[in-house]
Amino acid sequence: MTAAELEAVLRLLGPARHIVIGTAADPASRAAGERIAEAWGGLVLATVTWPETAASWLRQARRFAAPNPDAWVVSATPAGWAGMTRRLLLSTSWSPRRTVLTAALAGFSLPGLRGAHADGTTWENSWSTS
């Protein structure tokens, strides 16, 4: 995670009072999650880590969504996040509109998701399915 990317993630969190951080189990994703928690300095309700592959991701999805934070922040691999996203949408009250992704997930398309690129620019999926 670059310094510019970290600053962009913090800007996207805006006035959030508390967050939940989700990471893949790989060292780079976990390290980025730790950097975000340290730099943000607010209340982190939970940090949830998930594997690249899983039978269902149900346990991790429930832990990720249950605290109902102001925002969720995700630093993960595309494959693991795709599995988690499916489970979150099927089994929880998680909202993509309150979720910020790191640069590794910049190509992830779901209405409402926002994120940061490594160069500090940001993106948002604003298309709708209606």
Image (cartoon, grey):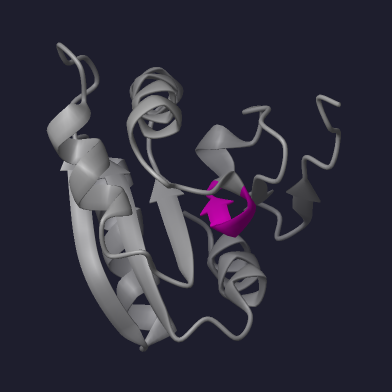
The residue shown at (40%, 46%) is: 75
Image: 16 above or below 70: below
Magenta span of residues? 97-102
Q: Quadrant of the C terminus?
A: top right
Q: Nearer the viewer, residue 88 or 76?
A: 88
In the rendered image, residue 72, in percent from the top left (x then y), is placed at 44, 59
Image: 2 above or below 26: below
In the rendered image, residue 59, in percent from the top left (x then y), is placed at 13, 35
Q: Is residue 117 visible?
A: no
Task: Give residue 79's quadrant in the image.
Answer: top left
- Is residue 98 highlighted in magenta? yes
Residue 86 in the figure: left or right of residue 104: left
The residue shown at (86%, 34%) is: 127
Task: Give residue 45's quadrant in the image.
Answer: bottom left
- Is residue 86 highlighted in magenta? no
In the rendered image, residue 68, in percent from the top left (x then y), is placed at 36, 64
